[in-house]
Image (cartoon, rainbow, N blue to C red):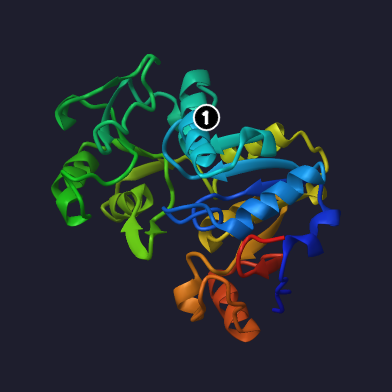
């Protein structure tokens, strides 16, 4: 397996009309937006390319858009934002996804207070106790339960009752300012290991790609490129959706590759990591840059 390593997106841009861009690890990593990413997005906009940001953020898309604008990415530079949280809300509202039907109307949120408003305004209500809940809504870890161990008893009880967990962030971890943090995907993995059933919304699962492609409005999937730093999410999901994928190596994989954020990896090491993950990105790039 040989994966081309490019220096900038300009090398590939003419081959594509639309771009599905990951955010965390590509545009920023919990702090300020990367300067080279801002410049690249501005070039895409100036070239008339269509851009949709696709994030596994377990919150409404408007909140993600506000964060992007705060980091210097004006709505004028892109066409849409889709978060896994927004996709989940749309699916609950429409009743369009088989895995989310017939769950019941009361959910027990696994979330930080204030970050659990995903279904507010719909015909669903949070439950204060697990005993009254029909399903789990996994948004993320919290100060009350900051570790997997702190969730063990609760998840064990939920699994024994046969409750489905709806995981609205399939990421198992992110790197925030250099420190790895667990996400809702880690809770889902632990729950599955206990025998619990999980319904996922977010990358790499099909719903978010279907919605993102509708937002792009480009019928030819060969003219769409997904960009992300997660082999198990961004690259896997793009492949399943039938679109090309560009792997950003300076994000989640930087430590494993032994590189700094802007440093190109050794081709053989990159190829081995991708081979082990059974993923074949169309190309790789150290960071999102023009």
| In the image, residue 224 above or below residue 112 | below
Q: Residues within 10 Å of mark 1 (few under 14, many from 20)?
A: some
Q: Is residue 13 above or below residue 103?
A: below
Question: What residue appears at the point 22 percent right and 55 percent down from the top-left corner?
Answer: 148
**Quadrant position of residue 48:** top right
Question: Is there any visible trace of residue 22 in the rendered image?
Answer: yes
Q: Where residue 134 appears, x then y in whole percent?
A: 27, 27
Total marks shown come to: 1
Q: Is 127 positioned to the left or the right of 214 in the image?
A: left
- The one of 247 and 66 positioned closer to us in this rendering: 66
Q: Nearer the viewer, residue 239 or 192?
A: 239
Locate residue 211, reporting x and y percent.
63, 34
Expressed as whole percent of the image width and height from the top left, the position of residue 110 reads: 26, 38
Left or right: residue 103 compared with residue 278: left
Query: Element under label 1?
Result: loop
- At 53% from the left edge and 19% from the top edge, which residue is drawn? 94
On the image, the x and y values in percent for residue 119 come to: 38, 23
The residue located at (68%, 34%) in the rendering is 76
Residue bearing the label numbered 1: 97
Camera-side residue: 5 or 167?
A: 5
Query: Where does the N terminus fall, quadrant-wise?
Result: bottom right
> Image quadrant for the C terminus?
bottom right
Residue 78 appears in the figure: no
Q: Is residue 248 above or below residue 263?
A: above
Q: Is residue 24 left or right of residue 188?
A: right
Determine whether, in the image, residue 208 is placed left or right of residue 139: right
């Amino acid at each position: 397996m040989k994966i081309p390593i490019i220096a900038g997106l300009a090398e590939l841009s003419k081959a594509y009309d639309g771009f599905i861009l990951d955010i965390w690890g590509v545009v920023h990593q919990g702090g300020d937006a990367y300067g080279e990413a801002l410049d690249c997005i501005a070039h895409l906009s100036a070239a008339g390319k269509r851009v949709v940001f696709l994030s596994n953020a377990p919150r409404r898309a408007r909140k993600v858009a506000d964060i992007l604008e705060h980091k210097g990415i004006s709505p004028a530079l892109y066409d849409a934002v889709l978060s896994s949280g927004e996709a989940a809300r749309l699916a609950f509202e429409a009743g369009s996804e088989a895995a989310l039907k017939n769950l019941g109307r009361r959910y027990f949120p696994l979330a930080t207070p204030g970050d659990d408003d995903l279904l507010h305004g719909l015909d669903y209500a949070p439950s204060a106790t697990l005993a009254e809940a029909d399903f789990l809504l996994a948004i993320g870890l919290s100060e009350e339960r900051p570790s997997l161990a702190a969730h063990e008893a609760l998840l064990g009880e939920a699994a024994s009752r046969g409750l489905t967990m709806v995981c609205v962030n399939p990421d198992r971890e992110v790197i925030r300012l250099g420190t790895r943090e667990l996400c809702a995907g880690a809770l889902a993995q632990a729950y599955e290991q206990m025998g619990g059933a999980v319904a996922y919304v977010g990358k790499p699962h099909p719903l978010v790609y279907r919605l993102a492609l509708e937002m792009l409005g480009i019928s030819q999937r060969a003219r769409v490129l997904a960009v992300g730093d997660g082999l198990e999410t961004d690259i896997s999901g793009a492949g399943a959706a039938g679109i090309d994928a560009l792997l950003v190596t300076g994000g989640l994989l930087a430590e494993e590759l032994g590189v700094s954020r802007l440093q190109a990896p050794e081709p053989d090491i990159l190829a081995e990591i991708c081979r082990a993950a059974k993923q074949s990105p169309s190309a790789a790039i150290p960071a999102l840059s023009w």
